[in-house]
Image (spheres, helix red, strand yellow):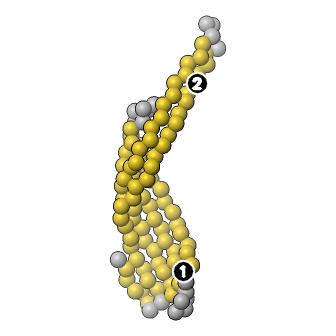
Amino acid sequence: MGVLIVPSFLLYATGGLAYGGARSDTTIVQSIDDPPLSTLMTSGSFSKTRGGYAVGAGGEWMLSSNWSAKLEYLTDRQSPAVTQVCPARHIRYSSAIRIEKTA
């Protein structure tokens, strides 16, 4: 959805479905120096496709009839994942600013 601010500048909002693969492999090694000497090791991993949403906003300038430039900000949130190593909820956020030249 967008609004034409002036004939050569479009301000817009965007959003939609976001999904991606999440993978984690973890190994923890703990050495105890106090007698008796011992080493403890544990490991775990998970792999899962997660879904969520993305929202953003931007502006696009018409430089000429065949050229435009765009500045856009996007952020997404993907669903929580439960890991085997640490049973905690992790929510992934990411943000990006893109600058594009379109012909």
Real-space Cα separation, disc 2 to disc 1, in angstroms: 51 Å
Please tell me in which quadrant of the rendered image residue 77 appears: bottom left
Q: Nearer the viewer, residue 9 or 49?
A: 49
Question: Looking at the image, which residue is at 44% across and 61% down?
Answer: 75
Say which amino acid is labelled 1.
Thr
Please tell me in which quadrant of the rendered image residue 57 appears: bottom left
Up-down: is 57 above or below 86?
Answer: below
Judging by the rendered image, the residue that carries numbered circle 1 is 102
Quadrant of image for the C terminus: bottom right
Question: Looking at the image, which residue is at 58% across and 22% down?
Answer: 30
Say which amino acid is labelled 2.
Val
Dot 2 falls on a residue whose secondary structure is strand
Q: Is residue 15 left or right of residue 65?
A: left
Judging by the rendered image, the residue that carries numbered circle 2 is 29
Question: Looking at the image, which residue is at 55% across and 75% down?
Answer: 100
> Residue 68: x and y, percent?
53, 84
| One can see residue 15 in this view | yes
Few, some or many residues within 10 Å of mark 2 (<14, 14–19, 20+): few
